[in-house]
Image: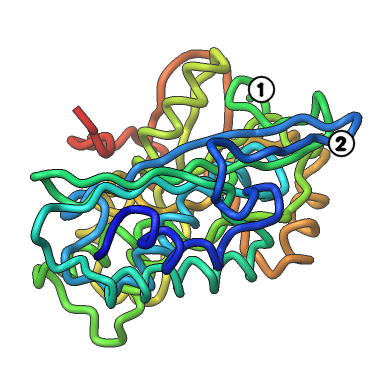
Amino acid sequence: MSGEFSFIARHFRQLAGPESLDLRDDCALISCPSGQEMAISTDTMVENVHFLTDDPPESVGRKLLRCNLSDLAAMGAEPYAYTLNVTIPHASRYDDVWFSAFAAGLAEDQKLYGVTLLGGDTTSTAGPLVLSATVFGRLKKGTALRRNGAKDGDSLWVTGTIGDAALGLLALQGKISDPTGFLSERYRLPRPRTGLNLNGLVHAAMDISDGLIQDCGHIAAESGVAIDILADTVPASSAANALGSQWLEQRLTGGDDYELLLTCAPENESVLVQACSQRNVPVTRIGAIRSGAGVHVLNAEGQVMEIQKKGWQHF
């Protein structure tokens, strides 16, 4: 690499939108239409914590963007743009070839999700590769989906299937079998559920990144309610089912799902199913909200199950 600015020009200027000022100034200039507000979120990925050193660079770029877009989906915001921070290890394998492929992955998902790059920062370190993105989304003022709106009597729903990514990481580490590669792919490429238009339809929402049980705990705490999860109803892929029921706890706590966790009034359930169906997104009822506190995982007989691990802990 022949310098920071030529590095940016080679790999990232092609990703920039008009608000970025071609990545030539100190700031981007963005505006928000009247009656709308901006949803902003940021996530960081660290080598061998959130992705593996030998993961394909295209998928690393796409995963970084998708993990962030999942936060916008959880708030009901339409993706708009993002910034990118790159911290590169000294004398590492992360050369121009790697970053060309990384940028190609970003470009592919920019087209898919309708976003452009606004700007960012590049630096170097003696530590691992660190990648951060900050996403910006737009939505009508006062319509954001929050974690604090769950109500006694709501039903609990999730999109997609739960636990594939956590099992996929184990497969990539050689700890379990993944003959079709489906689980590994789910770890490397989340599916952010953007564009569902659930604003005003569900009472509470968030994305599942740190494990289903732990993230249910966030909604329960913020809303002042108890959540009952019916373990047998939590949707699993055929690849996860093939591994057997002994992996249930890993599925419920492993994280990296980036599916949506939703609470919905009974009278809106059919509309919720229809809204998801229109976007070809599976959605499954997995439990209920009631008065009380905490998260309770129940077996088929309605008995509370003992779950040792609650979810991913950063500290």
Name the residue rendered at 72%, 55% in the picture.
195
- From this viewpoint, is residue 222 visible? yes
- From this viewpoint, is residue 164 visible? no
Where in the figure is residue 8, as x and y percent of width and height?
A: 41, 58
Q: Are marks 1 and 2 in contact (CB under 8 Å)?
A: no
- Identity, as a three-letter code, of the amino acid under mark 1: Gly
Badge number at residue 149: 1
Give 178 or 11, whichever is nearer the viewer: 11
User: Spatial distance from mark 1 to mark 2, Cα to Cα?
Assistant: 26 Å
Foreground mark, 1 or 2, reads 2
Label 2: element kind: loop
In the displayed structure, would residue 3 be above or below residue 288? Answer: below
Badge number at residue 178: none
Where in the figure is residue 32, as x and y percent of width and height?
A: 80, 35
In the displayed structure, would residue 222 be above or below residue 80? Answer: above
Where in the figure is residue 67, as x and y percent of width and height?
A: 45, 51
Image quadrant where one finds the C terminus? top left
* Residue 178 sits in quarter: bottom left
Residue underneath mark 2: 33
Name the residue rendered at 20%, 59% in the picture.
246
